[in-house]
Image: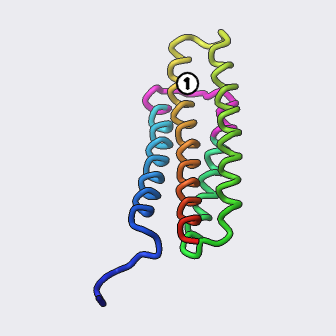
Amino acid sequence: MNQTFVTPIDREDIYALATGLDAVMDRMDEAADLILLYEVSVLPKEFAKQVALLQRCAELTSAAMPRLGTRKDLADYWIEIDRLESAGDKQYRRILAKLFDGRYEPLEVLKLKDIISAMESAIDGFEAVAHTVEQIVVKES
């Protein structure tokens, strides 16, 4: 009994959280890697808004993780992540519309679409992590 470690959070919830965080990191890494592999030297200025959304999601998630142990003051976290994800969806659609408006060469469109899709997927992943946190809080309260 003294050697048994009992986590304050169910093991399957820890696994879901770790898996979600890993998926987010994979998508962000994919976006960065595609920029290098495709040798994209200039990204459209609209991409900066997606990067800012990603950065804010990362900051909020990083700040929320230490509070998970007490499960206090986390509602603002998942509410804000949901809001940011909705803003990311809207920005993603605007970027796609611009990519397909004829200003870009077809090959450039394909490259940029891959990159922005990976960024959008990362933002969606942050929302999935926030939902996992919400489930943990609800389950453990």
Q: Quadrant of residue 91?
A: top right
Please indicate whether residue 73 sits to the left or right of residue 39 in the image: right
| Outermost bottom residue | 2
Where is residue 94 drawn, in percent x and y? 70, 25
Secondary structure at badge 1 equals helix
Where is residue 133 shown, x and y percent of the image?
Answer: 56, 60
- Name the amino acid, label 1: Leu
Q: Is residue 41 magenta?
A: yes
Q: Is residue 18 above or below residue 72?
A: above
Residue drawn at point x = 53 percent, y = 42 percent: 122
Q: Nearer the viewer, residue 82 or 61?
A: 82
Q: How many marks?
A: 1
Q: Residue at x 65, y 38 (%)?
A: 50
Residue at image position (55%, 59%) is: 135
104 over 131 or under it: above or below: above
70 shown above or below 90: below
**Where's residue 11, x and y in %?**
39, 66
Above or below: residue 115 compared with residue 29? above
Q: Is residue 60 magenta?
A: no
At x 43% / y 63%, what residue is drawn? Answer: 14
| Magenta range | 35-50
Q: Position of residue 37 (x, y in %)?
A: 43, 30
Question: Could you tell me which quadrant the C terminus lies in?
Answer: bottom right
Residue matched to label 1: 112
